[in-house]
Image (tube, rainbow, N blue to C red):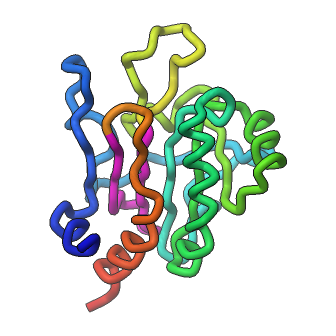
């Protein structure tokens, strides 16, 4: 059932947002297009690009609001740890990116001991590059710069292979679907 649903949507799950001000078609990267150049800071303070955070087949980037104040983000971050090993075995490296500081992410990592990479985008440059900034936040507020929660799949050739998001910020793309998506993408990317 999940396999047929995913195949029919060509790896794009994007529900419209509740706000009439935001055109859902303008949120997030376009599947099939080249991904923006990625530069972020790990929770250890290292600057990395896509090559450093990719597995044998590519990278799974989870854009999340904040691991400081967002309980839904924290819950998702812990759930992602359950699928990280399966994704790695399928050749996909998992990373979570927020606008939080590297120090805050290091604190979260020390408390939760997640097995995947936590990335900081304090200026929201990557959030903007991937067209995921939630523009409904008040400029200058503590929430300015947060992304719409989303999951982006980027193959090692730099192409966006999948994009998932849900309406609003409470619901998240289903974590349990990620290993199945990895398998489907591996089939689609395999030489014929």
The location of residue 137, given as percent across then percent down, is 44, 15
**Residue 63, visible in the rendered structure:** yes
Question: Which residue reaches farthest left?
Answer: 8
Picture layout, residue 75 above or below residue 132: below
On the rendered image, what quadrant is the N terminus found in?
A: bottom left
- Decide if residue 168 is on the left or right side of residue 93: left
The picture quadrant where one finds residue 161 is bottom left
On the rendered image, what quadrant is the C terminus found in?
A: bottom left
Q: Is 157 inside the magenta-drawn segment?
A: yes
- Decide if residue 24 is on the left or right side of residue 131: left
The location of residue 51, given as percent across then percent down, is 58, 62
Q: Which of 128 and 101 is in front in this view?
A: 101
- Decide if residue 123 is on the left or right side of residue 5: right
Picture layout, residue 18 above or below residue 116: above
Which residue occupies 27% across, 62% down?
11
The picture quadrant where one finds residue 155 is bottom left
Report the magenta stretch's main SS: strand
Which residue occupies 80% across, 35% down?
103
The location of residue 158, given as percent across then percent down, is 42, 61
Where does the magenta region start and end? 149-166
Which residue occupies 52% across, 17% down?
144
- Decide if residue 141 is on the left or right side of residue 120: left
Q: Is 168 inside the magenta-drawn segment?
A: no
The location of residue 104, given as percent across then percent down, is 76, 34
């Amino acid at each position: 059932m999940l396999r047929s649903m995913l195949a029919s949507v060509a790896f794009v799950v994007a529900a419209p947002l509740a706000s009439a001000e935001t055109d859902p078609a303008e949120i997030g990267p376009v599947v099939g297009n080249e991904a923006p150049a990625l530069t972020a800071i790990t929770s250890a303070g290292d600057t990395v690009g896509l090559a450093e955070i990719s597995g044998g087949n590519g990278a799974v980037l989870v854009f999340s609001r904040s691991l400081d104040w967002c309980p839904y983000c924290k819950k998702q971050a812990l759930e992602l740890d359950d699928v990280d090993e399966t994704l790695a075995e399928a050749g996909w490296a998992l990373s979570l990116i927020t606008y939080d500081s590297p120090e805050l992410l290091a604190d979260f990592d020390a408390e939760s001991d997640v097995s995947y990479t936590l990335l900081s985008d304090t200026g929201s440059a990557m959030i903007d590059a991937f067209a995921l900034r939630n523009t409904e936040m008040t400029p200058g507020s503590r929430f300015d710069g947060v992304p719409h929660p989303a999951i982006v799949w980027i193959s090692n050739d730099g192409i966006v292979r999948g994009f998932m998001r849900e309406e609003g910020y409470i619901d998240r793309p289903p974590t349990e679907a990620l290993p199945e998506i990895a398998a489907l993408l591996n089939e689609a990317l395999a030489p014929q």
